[in-house]
Amino acid sequence: MLDLAIIGGGAAGFFAAINAKRKHPNLKVEIFEKSKTVLGKVRISGGGRCNVTHACFDNRLLVSYYPRGNKELLSVFERFNTKDTVKWFESRGIVLKSEADGRIFPITDNSETIVNCFLDECDELKIPIKTLRSVKSIEKNGVFQLNINDEIVEARQVLVATGSSDAFWQILKGLGHKIIEPVPSLFTFNIENDFIAELMGLSVPKASVKLLLDKSQLKESRLSQSDLTQSGPLLITHWGLSGPAILKLSSIAARMLNQLQYRFEISVSLSNLKVEDTLDFLLKIKAEHPKKQVVNTPLFNIPQRWWQRIHSLTFVNTFNTWSDASKKDLLKFAENLSGFQLEVDGKSTFKDEFVTAGGVDLKEVDFKTMQSKIIPGLYFAGEVLNIDALTGGFNFQAAWSEAWVISDNL
Ligand SMILES: Cc1cc2nc3c(=O)[nH]c(=O)nc-3n(C[C@H](O)[C@H](O)[C@H](O)COP(=O)(O)OP(=O)(O)OC[C@H]3O[C@@H](n4cnc5c(N)ncnc54)[C@H](O)[C@@H]3O)c2cc1C
């Protein structure tokens, strides 16, 4: 009989197996993976470079990157956080580097470095990795009985690290767990109109994007006013809007956007100011530079192309000087600069990177051990849980930390 059967040979499953065996060498641990190969997502992660974690070393700040799971993860990060991840890999001879935006990668820029590290560790610790083994069901009659390729494997404890497998969520439902309906997170917004088409390729270092919801939608979404507006770099692509500001909004509002079937309105601000403040500034410029042409005086670090498009949509005559512009014109201009409204119709995947929001209801998990509150001895780690984060290495960090906590408590 196994002491720990790990279902899923992905990030969470491997990290749990290795640390469990290091801490408790006498435990009989095995990994069961349904595919031919293991660590598939680790291989393709971070564009093939594997963004293992993020250079955010303050746990309270770290949890703010998790739209779902932030409360629960705090105690988990207190036991194993981003600093520990860096130490863990470095103690195995992997040199990591941190990029300007905080993402941490192996210095080789190659995810195989991480995959090989895990495979070497399993080899050294003699952890059997059983591929082409799909777990079809779990029963508990004193011990766990797993139906794997129609054979029964017995285990004292089981870790479910099956990622976003719908089939496995159904199995967990059958065991009495509540599964929060999975919806996609981390996607870009499709917008089909001339404004976007003409600005294709434009990239802005700081913009704010606001999701426009009516009162009843806002109530239903359970989002706060501050959730609705996200800021950061923005990119105009040939299909719509992308960049960190958009990805953040897609993640935070993942569930609501799914309900809206990805048809909704946003307003984009490149002035990053309220309408009143933008207007005050425009009036000041009008007083100081009355003879200059508005179209040639981009302000607030707004790129010339965006400024010109907003200008031509606001003013009939594109050659107005500041003195020609009435206060009413400037108010309309300020409104468009502080919040240009666009209709989103659909979503696209961001660089093939996506995560699923949804999974095992966190209320049913004891985060001191990562154990099911319904079935003792059953553990969860990784994307199977209703936890997900923004891009930047946070999703792997959650998987590493949860797996570490499990390995502590066996
Ligand atoms: C393209 C892409 C790039 C990404 N890049 C990054 C990144 O750079 N940094 C980051 O932090 N996050 C990244 N992510 C997210 C990250 O990959 C996931 O959060 C992470 O892999 C989750 O780990 P996991 O172990 O829970 O699931 P997975 O890695 O998906 O592993 C689950 C495993 O379980 C197996 N399995 C499922 N059902 C069964 C069954 N019944 N029996 C046996 N085995 C089963 C699956 O085949 C799979 O191998 C990326 C995601 C994608 C799609």
Image (cartoon, rainbow, N blue to C red):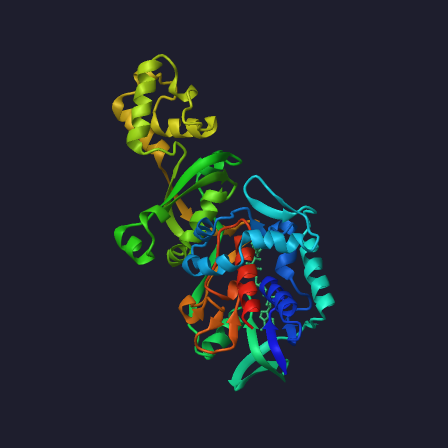
Picture quadrant of ligand 1? bottom right
* 34 on left or right of 65: right
* Number of marks in the rendered image: 0
Q: Position of residue 266 (x, y in %)?
A: 37, 44
Instruction: Judge from the rendering whether residue 73 lies leftward or rightward of residue 396; answer left or right.
Output: left
- The structure residue drawn at horizontal position 30% and vertical position 15%, both measured from the top left corner, is 287
Image coords of residue 365 (percent x, y): 44, 70
- Residue ranking furthest to the top: 291
Query: Which of the two residues, 96 or 25, is positioned nearer the viewer here?
Result: 25
Front residue of this view, candidates 272 and 145: 145
In the image: residue 398, left or right of residue 39: left
Q: Residue at x 30, y 27 (%)?
A: 279
Q: Residue at the far bottom: name it.
A: 141
172 vs 279: above or below: below
Among the 4 quarters of the image, the one containing residue 321: top left
Q: Is residue 307 above or below residue 68?
A: above
Q: Is residue 370 above or below residue 107?
A: below
Q: Is residue 315 visible?
A: yes
Q: Is residue 41 above or below residue 160?
A: above
Closer-to-camera residue (51/185): 51
Q: Viewer-proximal residue, 184 or 248?
A: 248
Question: x, y (%) of residue 354?
Answer: 53, 55
The C terminus - image quarter: bottom right
| Quarter of the picture holding the N terminus | bottom right
> In the figure, residue 165 lies in which quadrant?
bottom right
Q: Position of residue 75 (x, y in %)?
A: 45, 60
Q: Residue at x 40, y 42 (%)?
A: 209
Q: Can residue 161 be seen by looking at this rendering?
A: no
